[in-house]
Image (tube, coloured by chain):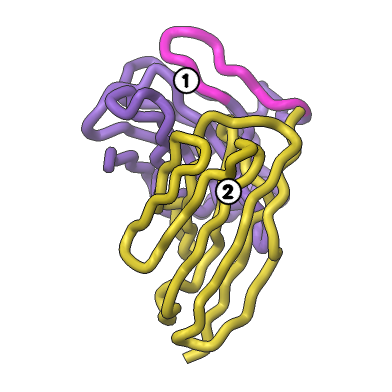
Chain colours: A purple, B yellow
Amino acid sequence: GAVVSQHPSWVICKSGTSVKIECRSLDFQATTMFWYRQFPKQSLMLMATSNEGSKATYEQGVEKDKFLINHASLTLSTLTVTSAHPEDSSFYICSARDPREGNTEAFFGQGTRLTVV
Amino acid sequence: GQQLNQSPQSMFIQEGEDVSMNCTSSSIFNTWLWYKQDPGEGPVLLIALYKAGELTSNGRLTAQFGITRKDSFLNISASIPSDVGIYFCPQDMRFGAGTRLTVKP
């Protein structure tokens, strides 16, 4: 299957600082990528859809000024958690659909565990 | 929006037992994708189904695309400890609650 890679795998930051998470499609080009947040014992919640060359589409209740998304190339999307607070601590996962599979099969990164202290 | 139900929410089984879980919805879909998430990892694609009635296997896993196109089933035969994880069947990139599987050695 296709490969989606996230970086970093984990990060600890101080409250009030910003953190950037990268999501790369390694062996295919993705015009669209998806960002999720997962709290312990819960499912993945879609935060936003990242569109290459245009603005991201955010799900209801997700603050676009808090979670900045940039999709500047066909293989890279970034999520920046601005002015992070302890309640932003979570597992963040990105995904992309492989156009070689008809854009139906989605592949996920390994996730980034963010801890805000 | 579409509502995705996964059943059961959790399962505790003995190693060697067979497992069955399902996804149901009030909406009709053209594909069903089954994923497994290991602790601390992203979901991994297990089986993809594209046609109503389709039955597909991947090793000890077998999945079926319901004839009504509103549901899908995943069966795991002869479970082993590494089957532990959460199983999902997302639609339109949105996830249900998942089925959490625990296998006792």
Q: What type is the residue that disc 1 sits on?
A: Asn
Alpha carbon distance from label 1 to label 2? 35 Å
Residue at x 55%, y 24% (from the top left corner): A49
Is label 1 or label 2 in front? 2
Q: Position of residue A83 (x, y in %)?
A: 64, 35
Q: Chain of mark 2?
A: B
Residue A8 falls left or right of residue A42: left
Residue at x 59%, y 36% (from the top left corner): B91
Q: Position of residue B42 (x, y in %)?
A: 45, 52
How many labels, in total?
2
The answer to whether residue A54 is above or below residue A110 is above
Residue A67 visible in this rendered orientation of the protein: yes
Q: Circle 2 sits in a helix, a strand or a loop, which is it? A: strand
Q: Residues within 10 Å of mark 2 (few under 14, many from 20)?
A: many
The answer to whether residue B17 is above or below residue A97 is below
Residue at x 51%, y 42% (from the top left corner): B53
Q: Residue at label 2?
A: B72
Magenta-colored span: A49-60
Q: Is residue A51 magenta?
A: yes
Q: What type is the residue that disc 2 sits on?
A: Ser
The label on residue A70 is: 1
The residue closer to the viewer here, B34 or A48, is: B34
Residue A3 found in image quarter:
top left
Q: Position of residue A36 (x, y in %)?
A: 57, 40
**Most distant residue in the left direction:** A27
